[in-house]
Image (cartoon, grey):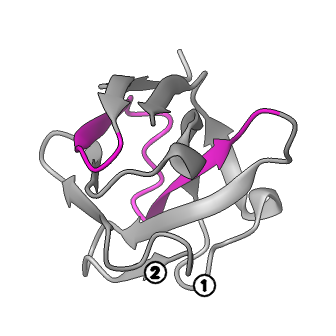
């Protein structure tokens, strides 16, 4: 079945850290790019970070640069989002997605498969 599964969300204090994981199935593993998006309460879903499977090239939203790090384990078809120095503004449901776009994949329309999301709540 087509499947992307996020995990690792939870409640954390401001300034703390969390690491999210996204496991892809064979059918959802594009072999090209994996991205993370988030949707905060009352807001539209926005791009967070992306990484290419082959070269590990990364791109980040300006709001998370220097704080978040995206990585991948190609053998496990798993992508990670390390989130440090968390702020209350980072509170959101986080989604991983698989894309066939090689570079500059920052738009939702560029992603083929989506996970159901994992909640991250940052307390102040």
Residue at which label 2 appears = 59
Secondary structure under badge 1?
A: loop
Q: Which quarter of the picture shows residue 10? A: top left
Marks 1 and 2, the one that precedes in the sequence = 2
- Is residue 34 magenta-colored? yes
Circles 1, 2 touching at the beta carbon (< 8 Å) = yes
Q: Is residue 76 left or right of residue 41?
A: left
Q: Is residue 97 visible?
A: no
Q: Is residue 32 left or right of residue 110?
A: left
Between 44 and 4, the one nearer to me in the picture: 44
Secondary structure under badge 2?
A: strand
Residues in magenta?
14-41
Between 85 and 2, the one nearer to me in the picture: 85
Residue beneath the point at 45% across and 36% down: 124
Q: Is residue 89 visible?
A: yes
Q: Is residue 113 left or right of residue 51?
A: right
Q: Which mark is residue 104?
A: 1
- Is residue 90 magenta-colored? no
Q: Residues within 10 Å of mark 2 (few under 14, many from 20)?
A: many
Reply above or below: 56 against 113: below
Marks 1 and 2, Cα distance to the nearest angstrom?
7 Å
């Amino acid at each position: 079945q087509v499947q992307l599964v996020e995990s690792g969300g939870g409640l954390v204090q401001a300034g703390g850290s969390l690491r999210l994981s996204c496991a892809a199935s064979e059918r959802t593993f594009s072999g090209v790019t994996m991205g993370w998006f988030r949707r905060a309460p009352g807001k539209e879903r926005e791009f967070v970070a992306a990484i290419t499977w082959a070269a590990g090239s990364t791109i980040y939203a300006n709001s998370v640069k220097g704080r978040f790090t995206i990585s991948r384990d190609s053998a496990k078809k798993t992508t990670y989002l390390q989130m440090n120095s968390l702020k209350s503004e980072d509170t959101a449901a986080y989604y991983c997605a698989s894309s066939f776009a090689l570079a500059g994949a920052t738009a939702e329309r560029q992603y083929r498969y989506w996970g159901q999301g994992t909640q991250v709540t940052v307390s102040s």
